[in-house]
Amino acid sequence: MVEDEDGAPTTPVRVMVVDDHPIWGNAVARDLAEAGYDVTAVVGEGTQAIRVAPAARPDVVVLDLQLPDLSGVEVVRRLIATDPAIRVLMLSASGEQQDVLDALKAGALGYLVKSAKAAELIEAVARTAAGDPVFTVGLAGLVLGEYRRLAAAPDAPVDTPRLTERETEVLRLVAKGLSYRQIAERLVVSHRTVQNHVQNILGKLQLHNRVELTRYAIEQGLDSPGAST
């Protein structure tokens, strides 16, 4: 659900499902529809997804990695280039490290393997719609490990843009993996206030999404045990 400033559900989240196996794609669409999502399109090819997206206007795209015409990674790039507000959740049979990292670098917000249960998928779509990165158990550690490796590289950024004390506090909680709702509860503010802080931080740091924001926070050591709030 799309949430108001107090975190209450308002209108159904619009979802487009992209998978070249009709039985699987339709099953995913059915589970999401039964959970209250507005499934606006179910398509089987990447080019079709790119063509249909402007009319379907999805908040979240549940996207298979392996498609017959384009790779899921390329579809992510094109969808986000067309509409940066679209949030993509990869749903793939592959849990290979490179596949996960390629999808995230292209702009996907989360990555779930197809062995996930229906309840996990439903929750993952909700979190993706809220802007929270979500991964199948085990993949989150893989991603954080890669970000730490990149942060240790010689060309890692050294300049730190000026953030307010509250923005730094929000960033630290993002680095610890808390959702927007959890951050709002921790800081005793509204869900919308947390979203506004995150948008301000993204603007100051010239980043595009929460995955990049998490990487930056890790580079700055804000996820370490000593970085408490």
Image (spheres, grey):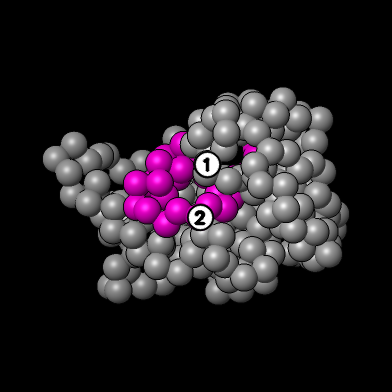
Snapshot quadrant of residue 120: bottom right
What residue do we see at 41% from left, 62% from top?
140
Which dot marks residue 93? 2
Q: Which residues are magenta?
A: 85-108
What residue do we see at 62% from left, 32% from top?
46
Q: Is residue 90 magenta?
A: yes
Pick the quarter of the image with the C terminus.
bottom left
> Residue 91's spot in the image, x, y percent?
57, 53
Note whether residue 100 is visible.
Answer: yes
- Decide: is 71 above or below 60: above
| Alpha carbons under labels 1 and 2: distance apart | 9 Å
| Residue furthest out toward the left | 154
Say how many tags the image has. Answer: 2
Note whether residue 2 is visible.
Answer: no
User: Label 2 amino acid?
Assistant: Ala
Name the secondary structure under disc 1. loop
> Residue 204's spot in the image, x, y percent?
46, 39
For this rendering, which residue is in front, 175 or 193? 175
Snapshot quadrant of residue 161: top left
Name the secondary structure under disc 2. loop
What residue do we see at 49% from left, 64% from top?
136
Dot 1 alpha-carbon crowd within 10 angstroms: few under 14, some 14 to 19, many 20 or more? some
Kindly check if marks 1 and 2 are in contact, taking CB atoms under 8 A apart as contact: yes
Snapshot quadrant of residue 80: top right
Q: For mark 1, what is the residue?
A: 66
> Residue 113's spot in the image, x, y percent?
52, 59
User: Label 1 amino acid?
Assistant: Gln
Looking at the image, is mark 1 or mark 2 earlier in the sequence?
A: 1
